[in-house]
Every structure is written in C-alpha cells, then in structure tokens.
Image: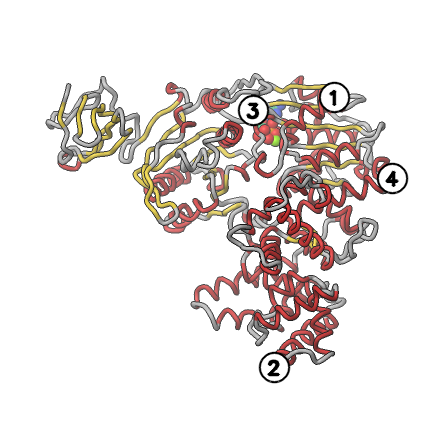
Amino acid sequence: MDVSHLLDELNEAQREAVTAGSGHMLVLAGAGSGKTRVLVHRIAWLIQVEHVSPMGLMAVTFTNKAAGEMRGRVGKLLGIAPNGLWIGTFHGICHRLLRLHAREAGLPETFQILDSEDQYRLIRRLIRDMEFDEGEFPPRQVQGFINHHKDEGRRPDEIEVWDQGFQASQVEIYRHYQAACERTGLVDFAELLLRTVELLRDRPERLAHYRQRFGHLLIDEFQDTNTLQYALVRLLAGDDNRLFVVGDDDQSIYGWRGARVENVQHYARDFSPLVVRLEQNYRSTGTILEAANRVIDHNDDRMGKNLWTEGEPGEPIRVFAAYNAEDEADFIIGRIEDWIRAGRKPSEAAVLYRSNAQSRLFEQALLRADIPYRVYGGLRFFERAEVKDAMAYLRLVHNRDDDSAFERVVNVPARGIGQRTVAELRQAAGSRGLSLYQAAVALCAEDALAARARKAVGAFITLIDGLAGELTDAELGPAMDRIIQATDLIEHYRGREAPDRVEAREENLTELVRAAETFSQPFEDEQAGLSPLASFLAQAALEAGEHQAEHWQDCVQLMTLHSAKGLEFPLVFMAGMEEGLFPHSRSVEEPGRLAEERRLCYVGMTRAMELLYMSFAESRQLHGQTSFSRPSRFVGELPEHLTESIRPGLTTRPAGPTSPQPEDGLPPLGAQVRHPSFGDGTVVEREGQGANTRIQVHFEQAGPKWLIAGYAPLERLS
Ligand code: ATP
Ligand code: MG
C-alpha cells in the first residue's frame, strides 16, 4: 500500500516521530512546529501501516473542538471515517468509561454531570444549610478548595487536617458536598477523573481489559495535564502499551487550575521515552517567531529549545496605544475592516484577551460595523439561563433524583413553591436520605405540607411524571420541544422581561430544540450503550462554551488567550496589554504565576501566522471605576526592532527624533520639559494639529502622560 501521503508533508524529525517503532515517545517542541500534525499522522500511520484497529487507539486532546478537528484530519488522511477510534478530552473519555461501568464505579446509571455553575450553587446552599458564615467561607473559595483536593486525587478523609478551625470546616463542607452529590447522582468535572482512576485502580479486571484494548495512547498538550490525568495515564500504560506524548513546557497555562508542567519530566523519568525535538516552525513569520522567543526568554527554568523558520520576516508587530478601551476596540475593528476590504476572510482574524469580560466592547464595535463574529468559550450557549432551565427539566424528566435540576426549576415558572417549602423539602430529604423529588412525593403523601404548598408541589410532581411517561420513547428534538411548551417557560420570561430579552431567549430555546434534533450521537457512545439522551446531556455539560462550531467558518473569532491554545490565525490582535490586566494583577507578586502569564503571552503571540497587533488602553473602566495603567511589561519585552508603534490617525511609525518637527511653538519630540505636579520628563510622542495637539510625556517619576500641548503648564528645559 502506498503510504507516502502520510510522510510527504513532514520534515525529518517529524517523520522519525510518526514512524517510531517500539517504545514510548515524547515529542517536545515549541509552538507551531507541527506537534499536533505529527500526532494526527501517527494515528493514521498506526492504522494504515501497523494495522492497528481504530478500536485499539485512544487519543486525548484539550478541547472537544480540537477532538473534532483531529477526527476529521485522521479521516481525511485515511480516506474513511475512523470509526471506533476514541478521540476526546480526558473528561469526555472518563465520562464514557463511567457510563459503561456506572455500577462498578458506585454511581447510578442515570448520573448527571454537575457543571461548575451548578456546583457553585450547591456548595453555597450547603454552606447556608450548615449555618456557616458566607463571608468567612465564600462559596467560590470553598469550591476552589474542593476542586483543588479532588484534582490531586484526595477524598475528604485523605486531607491532612492541620487546623481544627477554618481548614477543618472546609473539609467538613467538602464531605457534605460529596455526600449530596452521591445521594443525587451528580458528578462534577474533577469527579469524572477521580472516579475513573479509582475504578481502574480498584478493579484489576477492568484495567486489564482496557490495557488490552487500547494498545496505543496518544496525548496532545501534555504540559497541561493535572495529577489525576497523569495517574490515569500511568494506570492505562501497562507493559505492552505504547504512549505517544506531545507537548511544550512553554505553553503550560493551566497551572491555576491544577495542571502540572512537571508531568513532562515525570513522564520522561517514568517511561524513558524516545525524545524527539521539532525545531522548525511552520506557522508564523520570522518576526513574530523571534519576538515570541524573546519574550519567553525572560522566564527561568525552561527546558529550552530552538525554534526557527524558513518563512519571510514579514511585517513588524504593531503596537497600538489607545486612549481608552472604546478607542482600542474601534482601532481593532478598523483593522479588521481593512483586512476584509483587502479580500481576506473574517474568520482569519482573531481578537484575543485575558478575561472574558473584555469581549463586550469588541462585540459592540463588530455589531456596529456589521461584521459577523463568534465569541468562543465566552458566551456559553449551554450556560444561558433559559437554556439551563429547559435542560434542567430535561434532566429531571430523565432522572427525578437530580437535585440540582429540581432546585433550579421547582419554581420556574413561579408556581407558588416558595423558599419555605423548598427548605422543608430539603430538610426532609436530608434527614431521610432522599432526593428532593422523593421527599416531595413523600411529604405530599403524608399530607405534611401546608395546603397551598401541597397543591403546588403536587402539580409539579404531576407535570414531571406526566412528561416522563409521555417522552419515554420520544426522539430528542420533539421531547425538548414538548418540554419547553409544557412548562410554559417562554410565558415565564415574557411576564418578567423586556420584549427584546424575551425574543433572545425564545431564539435560544428554538436553537436548543434544533441542537437536540440535529444531535448525532458519537458512534463510540452508541457502541458503549449510551442512550442518545445521556450523550446529549453530557455533551451539553462538557461542551458548554464550545457550541458554535457550525458558525465557525466565516466569523471573526473572539476568545480568551486560554481558549486560543493550539489554534492559529493569519491575523491576531492581543488586546488589553496592560499591567494589572495582563499580566493579571493577582499574578504580579508571585514569580511562578508571573511566569505562567508570560507563557500565556507566548501562546497568544504564536497563534499569529502573518500579522500580529498588540494594544493597550491608557484608561479603562474596571469594576465601575476608571483606572489608568501602564503598558504590559510583556510589550516592553518585545525587541524594538521588531515592532512599530501606532497612534490614532497615524498609520506609520510616529515621528522619531530625525523626522521633521512642526514649527508651531509646541515642545517637539525629544524635548525635556517640567510639569508642576508630574516633574521632569521627555516628550515622546505627539499627534493632532494646532490647539488640539496632544503630546505624550514620559515623566521620570510619574510615568507616561498624555497632555494637550497648548494648555498643559509645561516649562521647556531643552
Ligand atoms: P501548538 O504548539 O501551537 O499546538 P503545534 O506544534 O501543534 O502548535 P501544528 O498546529 O501541528 O503545530 O502545526 C502548525 C502549522 O504548521 C500548521 O498549519 C501545520 O499544518 C503546519 N505544518 C506543520 N508541519 C509542517 C510541515 N512539515 N510542512 C508544512 N506545514 C507544516
Ligand atoms: Mg498543537
């Protein structure tokens, strides 16, 4: 068989990795060097040349979107869909394993995934129920505490309690939380991993089965695996299994969420893999690559690598100083308009930012300019209130013991079940070890509720039971539609909100019905015996934030720097390059976290193929206040000869000391000046004309300031 197409478009080192014989493999290489490509080709190689069945391969990626792309690319190389091949995220794969072995894992068959928002609500409720002070035990912080321990594989009993006060109480909340999840069949994200690790650890026959089945385990973005994920890898890798791991220590950006870049070294130590380094970058221009390399050079403790390109040097990196965030957004959208006018596609442009909240201004500016866009990972479809309400009904109809779904919709729409009644249900559920739904049925039967409450609760039970009976064998789409109609959700919003909001919610619900109708169950899920409904619910919980793929093609892409990992775009904007925003204010005090922010900057820069813009605003509304900030230190780390600074109205480098100076009697560039409050400084930029001329002065003490030249009380020193 001719397999040259598997190797043709690879360089020597890439080929070595793809065709490696026995043993484990570690491909350690910088951004854009073809790691993901090598992994895809390796899968095709194993199937086509080594005749490994697709069923014998497990490939792990970082997002569901990446998994989808990988499946497509493997299919293209092979010429047929690789059915039976498990490609997914660690969470997705663990979910599938737990569905297959729910009982052995100690879970009900109908267990549901608890997403982080619902997890937060549950923890907050438990804190209240346990009569702790929410000020002393902020639910978000407790949530972090619980997830941190779970990510490290620790159950409440395994936490070393060194403080009988605060810490012991947090452990107590964790214990209650865990009990509540178990009572109601809820599994949070970390639990998906922990349960799977425990299942395989405690059931040797299961472990043996999967070791035999998955002869090859391939993992992308290995630098961001956490303790549990590495434990899972170690479990699955028996003597006859082969690991193929690719990663880049410089792109480890999830340390704050438990990722451990040391896993790369641990892997090298534990498995003695053959190490292949890829050094040629195929993605970015020479300028972008060199600048990114220079920025990341500021970090210590790197494994170190060489990265070069044969590509053109390309354009300099454009650095834009905006007056404020609105100005920044207008500038970026203007450049995107130029791009589209030049015949390029909107989807080739990406705006990257540090925190989700920054997307709003870009969204508004894009709307005004009538340019289609998508927020990736931000406005999460499955997290919108109306979608969650409808999904909660679907979950409840599917599993009546799903307490978090019960709580969400028991009084949505309002049906006269107040907080008091819900508290009574909780109380009964807690003391009798029942789910809320069971408690509701019991209290109604015992006539233990006030008459009005009993009637309302009874009606709710009838509604859910009725729907459950009616929809047993229904297709997903019609079932979703029926639920939305029967529960009067739209009327509920209509009664409370402005027409345009209601319309948006209605559209989202219509979209949800469409999502259910067009949901096609992954072949591997079906093979694993999952019902389409179970797959759909899991997808909704796992893929929240990734649900916009069908519109992916021709829209400008907005996303956080974190979600840009692994992707590439011809035109990239990194916005909000300001101290305090990026690097984030929480990180500047701690060297470890600062280094992680710098890696994030490296990730952002290396997404760019042709053109990279970085921008910062001198003032910005943050938390309802105007704040002034300095440009990010990362901008300062760019080598000057690779950048070009831009001010509004200027399309080329601002006048330097050698450029002609306007003869208007205002301080020229380079002039030394004194200001009564800011002290001495140098004029570094100027723009505008006549009375409106603005100059930027770099004050020795006070830093850079923009001033109206004609009005500022400046004394010229030179
Ligand atoms: P990241 O670290 O950002 O995840 P990566 O190392 O996974 O990057 P890829 O995304 O696999 O890199 O590849 C980067 C780009 O270079 C892709 O567009 C890919 O198609 C291209 N590429 C990789 N290897 C080659 C090659 N040998 N010839 C031509 N193009 C290549
Ligand atoms: Mg990659």
Q: Are marks 2 and 1 in contact (CB under 8 Å)?
A: no
Residue behind mark 3: 282
Which-is-in-front pick, marks 3 and 4?
4
Q: Nearer the viewer, residue 596 or 701?
A: 701
Counting residues from the N terminus, which is met first, the one under dot 1 or under dot 4? 4
Please, what is the three-letter code of the amino acid marked with disc 3? Answer: Tyr
Q: How many marks?
A: 4
**315 to 514, vertically: above or below:** above
Residue drawn at point x = 24 percent, y = 24 percent: 655
Which-is-in-front pick, marks 2 and 4?
2
Residue behind mark 2: 452
Q: Nearer the viewer, residue 654 or 230?
A: 230
**Quadrant of the image for the N terminus?**
top right
Which-is-in-front pick, marks 2 and 3?
2
What element does badge 2 sit on? helix
Which-is-in-front pick, marks 1 and 4?
4
Residue drawn at point x = 17 percent, y = 37 percent: 692
Please, what is the three-letter code of the amino acid marked with disc 4? Answer: Pro
Residue behind mark 4: 204
Counting residues from the N terminus, which is met first, the one under dot 2 or under dot 1? 1
Q: Are marks 1 and 3 in contact (CB under 8 Å)?
A: no
Disc 3 beta carbon < 8 A from ligand 1? Answer: yes
What element does badge 4 sit on? helix
Counting residues from the N terminus, which is met first, the one under dot 2 or under dot 3? 3
Counting residues from the N terminus, which is met first, the one under dot 3 or under dot 4? 4
Please, what is the three-letter code of the amino acid marked with disc 1? Answer: Pro
